[in-house]
Image (cartoon, grey):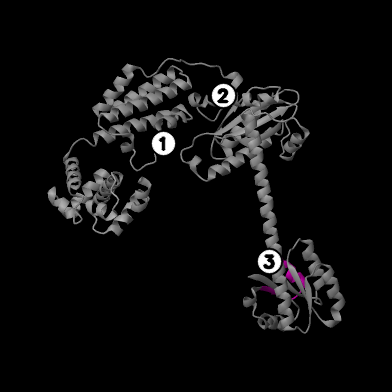
Amino acid sequence: MYKVLIVDDEYYFRQALKISLPWSELGFQIAGEAKNGAEALEQMTELEPDVVLVDMNMPIMDGLEFIHKAKERGQTTKFLVLSGHSEFVYARQAVQLGVVNYVLKPINEEELQSSLLDIKELIRTERLGKLELDDLRRRASEGLSVLKEQVLNGWLQGKAISRAPSERGRLNDLGIKLEGLHYRVIVVDLDSSDERNLEEGMRIRQAKLQEIAQKDMQSAFQCAGCYDHDARLVLIIGTSDGSFNRLETICERIRLYVQDNLDCTVTIGLGNSYDKFESVSVSYKEALIALKHRFVWGGNKVFAHSQVAESGIKVGLFSVDKRSSLLMHMRSGQPAGTTEWLSTFFHDTRVKSATMEMLLLAGIEIVSTCLEFLSEAPQTLEDVFLNTTQPDMIQHVQRMKTFNELEDWIRVLVLKTMDHVHSRKPNRAVKVIEAVKTYISGHYGNDELRIEDIAKSVHMNYNHLCFVFKKETTFTINDYLTEIRMTKAKELFDQGEKVIQDVANRVGYADANYFSKCFKKYMGITPSKYVNQSR
């Protein structure tokens, strides 16, 4: 609906106008009315009408003055003048002010309706055009932004850049002005903060971080920024005289601003200075090396490559004796003793000031010890983390950002592994589950097999059996029975069986159509397609 404001000093004329047309059917609604231009001007900001029907001859402020003042305020409203024959000259002046049209009094309803529909189409066309223009601008801006990111990331990877004038012009168009300077690269990375980095708000923080960091850097240096392939903010800065004296002060200021205003912290790594543009990639790698010291010393700091000396022991931290000792504690099933062992190990490791690489290697070796412990059960990591999204363990360790993060994660892994294994040692429930699985294995081909029959076979109440089976396995008896039947059906198809009805009957389905639905739901493909693909 388009909003209409009626401005006329005659009360009865305004009331008649409001009922003279089927406003809603035409796509309009009367938003307000005023008896003179001054009163209408006060209402314009609040009502924001799309169309104003305005009389020319009114007290206090006439129609022409009202339209003029509304235009001065930048109003995009469309004005339709209501004018008597004696005011025709004023109507022409109003048209010169940008009024869309005028209708002579007494009002001809058809003429007024036609003018309103013309205005409605004009507004729609203008708004559609504005949306298309805004969309074009947005896409152009996004395209330039993506292109800029690609160019800058190419520099970080050491890709050569052409010195041709056309290429320099292209860089200027992208807002990159870093030619003929001394160069240095800075990497700014958000520190881990529990679930916050997984929220939608992370992208907002990244945008604010880039805006803050670039603005601060540009106060002292030429600067171009982008995000690398690991979502770290990278700033390539340049100076004509090779002086970067204020750089660490600015980095510290950025760190403190983020800490105080963005509900997160950052760690900043600084590469060394080079006088050749081709060395930007070298400085970037140095900044990443400096950033890695967060692992040992913690985040929310600024590390300069030139000031970070390679230190720490480079011998193995997780000896054979330590491996045997940890296994013994895990086998004992006593969480307190295992927790104490882990605390002592990580404390001693900190005292030794081991390198980041050695710390990561120790973490990987502890994961390996967990796998060895599980193989004795026998269990797997998939069993421990059933129904959860668990990443590749080795890669997960290698992505750790701090030593504290590694220690906390290792402790949870070890204790959860112990709890899983020791809580599943043979008991009455486990024996019942095994008996159920054995019974199903021998009777899955019976299309009249019921859970009541299974419950009788293990001498247990129907409801209690369903509860125990779900508690111990995390899935229902029907789910398990379906899985067995689908697995057996797949085996039969793989062995050359082609008749779907025969396979359905052999795995416990009298209805081939229902079997086909179950097979597709389980396998993601119909039996007929599976058979055709297997030929």
Residue 438 visible from this viewpoint:
yes
Residue 213 visible from this viewpoint:
no
Judge the density around disc 1: few (<14), some (14-19), many (≥20) Cα neighbours within 10 Å. Answer: few
**Circles 1, 2 touching at the beta carbon (< 8 Å):** no
Residue 527, disc: none
Q: Which residues are magenta?
A: 31-47
**Circles 2, 3 touching at the beta carbon (< 8 Å):** no
The secondary element bearing badge 3 is classed as helix
| Amino acid tagged 2 | Ala
Q: Residue at x 40, y 21 (%)?
A: 347
Q: Mark 3 = which residue?
A: 124
The secondary element bearing badge 2 is classed as helix
Q: From the viewer's perspective, is the residue at label 1 or at label 2 nearer? A: 1
- Tell me where residue 65 appears, x and y as whole percent: 82, 69
From the viewer's perspective, is residue 202 above or below residue 107? above
Magenta span: predominant SS is helix
- Tell me where residue 514 appears, x and y as whole percent: 29, 58
Q: From the viewer's perspective, is the residue at label 2 or at label 3 nearer? A: 3
Q: Quadrant of the N terminus?
A: bottom right
- Of the residues under marks 2 and 3, which one precedes in the sequence? 3
**Res 180 → quadrant:** top right
Residue 290, disc: 2
Q: Mark 1 = which residue?
A: 391
**Res 411 → quadrant:** top left
Judge the density around disc 2: few (<14), some (14-19), many (≥20) Cα neighbours within 10 Å. Answer: many
Going by the image, does 341 lie left or right of 23? left
- Tell me where residue 268 appears, x and y as whole percent: 58, 29
Tell which residue pokes out farthest to the right in this image: 89
